Image (cartoon, grey):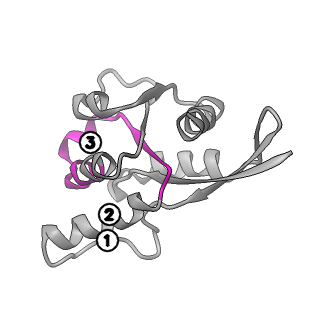
Amino acid sequence: MSVHQVHVFISHSWAYSGHYDTLSRWIFGQNWRFGRARIDFRNYSVPRNDPIVDTPNIRTLREAIYRQIARSHVVVIPTGMYTHYSKWIGKELEGSLAYDKPILAVDLRGAQRTATVVGNAATKFVSWNSASVAAGIWDLYYR
C-alpha cells in the first residue's frame, strides 16, 4: 500500500467561511483511500490564523495567494454566486492558470446558479458531498 500526500488549496471568502469549513472538514478530517492508495490530503489554503487581509496593494495580495497555490496540487473552488464579487477568486483563478494547477469546481447544494468564471476555468465538476469532492481531488492529482 502506498501513501500519497496531496496538497489542496481551497478557495474561500471569510464572509462565506461555512463553505470552506465544510470542505475542509470533508477533505482533511477523514482518512481517504482510493484502491490500494492511502491519501494524505494536506491543507495549503490561506490559513484562518494568518489571513491575507489589509495587504498594501493588489500585487502583494496576488503574490501571497500565488505562493499558496504554487505549492498545491489541486485548487478547489465552490461555485456559489459570491465568487462573482470576490477579488480573491479572480486572483486564485489567475494563479491556478499561471501554475497550471487543475481546478475542481464544487457545485453547492441547492444552488440555483453557479459562477460562470469558475465554470469556465474548471478542470472538473463534482457535487456537494464528501466522497465526490475527495474523489475529484484524487482524480485531478493522479491524472
Q: Earlier in the sequence, mark 3 or mark 2?
A: 2
Task: Report the residue marked by disc 3.
Answer: 83
For the residue pair 47 and 64, the one nearer the viewer reads as 64
Residue 46: horizontal and vertical position, in percent?
42, 65
Question: Which secondary structure lies at badge 2?
Answer: helix
The segment highlighted magenta reads 72-92
Task: Report the residue marked by disc 1.
Answer: 52
Q: Amino acid at mark 3?
A: Thr
Q: Is residue 54 something that shows in the picture?
A: yes
Quarter of the image for the N terminus: give it.
top right
Q: Residues within 10 Å of mark 1 (few under 14, many from 20)?
A: some
In this picture, residue 123 sits left or right of residue 116: right
Q: Amino acid at mark 1?
A: Ile
Q: Is residue 30 above or below residue 110?
A: below
For the residue pair 91 and 13, the one nearer the viewer reads as 91
Q: Residues within 10 Å of mark 2 (few under 14, many from 20)?
A: many
Q: Residue at x 23, y 54 (%)?
A: 91
Quarter of the image for the C terminus: give it.
top right
Residue 62: horizontal and vertical position, in percent?
23, 64
